[in-house]
Amino acid sequence: MTIGLLTSGGDAPGMNAAIRSVTRSAIARGFKVIGIRRGYQGLLEGDMYELGARDVSDILHRGGTMLYTARSKEFATPDGVRKAKEVLDSAGIDSLIVIGGDGTYRGALDLSRLGVRCIGIPGTIDNDIVCTEYTIGFDTAQNTALEMLDKLKDTEMSHNRCSVVEVMGRKAGHIGVRVAAATGAIDCLTVERPYDLDEICQKIIEQKNAGKSHFELIVAEGVVSKDFTSDDIAKYIEAKTGVTSRATVLGHVQRGGSPTCYDRVMALKMGYYAVELLSNGISNRIVAVRNDKLVDFDIEEALKMQKGYDEKLHSVLRILSI
């Protein structure tokens, strides 16, 4: 068996651990592994090379992805998918393991319909893949955001401020709600749950009158737009409450850094599981976590599932922020 391996979409800490696991698990079974640089775009261009056991040494602690990643408009077309299949055939690649999010899986689904044996591994900091409770990179990203928020708290306490902190999560508020709960924020604005800024401002006023001197409001990036930014939210709060407010956008710092132990171990397990599926003749599946156990789902079925949001945690953080 010759396995192609690529990372696609946004990078996530732990992707390198998954690359290492897939490569060495496959080599241990006598398979060949071809690393494909820059995702599906690199596949279209034939940018690939054989990976040996030593090629993936000393990458467990590194963030990002040694195979690089990119988005491809060409691959999103039927002609692009057919071209990718031709490239795989020419390279003698009969199976493909892809690490990424929903967009990555849709590409794998398209290739599987042309006869390519595909396995998907969930890798995205947003934890927004519907079929799995956990995605590689989420633990590192939330801990990075938490570290930054703890540092900001020192400044807001010194100046009696309200910090409006924008975290990543364009289509999901999982990072936002967890770091909001972990830092004692007054609330968290996410795409999953309606919010009322006037209600939040009233809560700030009440707590200010009761002696509280500093506040944090966490905002998932999907809530804001070019017409209503985190800075606009901070200005609105200051105008309504009289509390000096500043906006901070954490941005892509959340994607980088050395992966946590949890992300590394989970990536190793998922990579091994993906190769095991292929070695058992099973393909066109997504590796997933359910009840802390590794399982797998049909790609098409997985893409139709609905992702839950931790409403309970959101309610708890609001109750405790008194």
Image: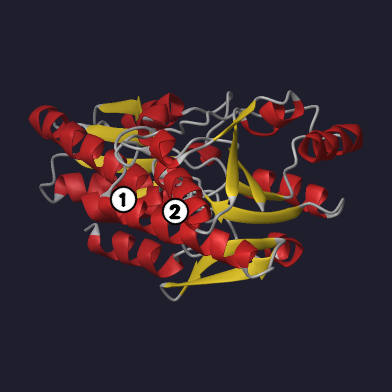
Q: Residue at x 70, y 27 (%)?
A: 41
Look at the picture and state if 6 lies above or below 272. Answer: above
Farthest residue toward the right?
79
Horizontal arrangement in the rendering, residue 174 relative to residue 184 (left or right): right
Return the x and y of residue 291 as percentages of the image width and height. 44, 76
**28 to the left or right of 60:** right
Q: Residue under circle 2?
A: 174
Per the image, label 1 sits on a secondary structure element best described as helix
Q: Residue furthest front?
A: 30
Q: Residue visible at 62% across and 54% down?
A: 120
Q: Which residue is mark 1?
A: 180
Q: Pick whichever, 251 or 60, lies toward us.
A: 60
| Labels 1, 2: front one | 2
Image coordinates for residue 256, horizontal then vertical, percent: 36, 32
Q: Residue at x 35, y 37 (%)?
A: 59
By what rule are the colours in the image chosen? secondary structure
Q: Position of residue 246 (x, y in %)?
A: 30, 26
Q: Nearer the viewer, residue 173 or 205?
A: 173
Q: Which amino acid type is shown beneath numbered disc 1?
A: Ala
The type of residue carrying mark 2 is His
294 vs 13, left or right, is right
The label shown at residue 223 is none
Dot 2 alpha-carbon crowd within 10 angstroms: few under 14, some 14 to 19, many 20 or more = many
- Does any portion of residue 99 appear in the rendered image? no
Under tag 2, what secondary structure? helix
In space, the residues marked 1 and 2 are separated at their CA atoms by 10 Å
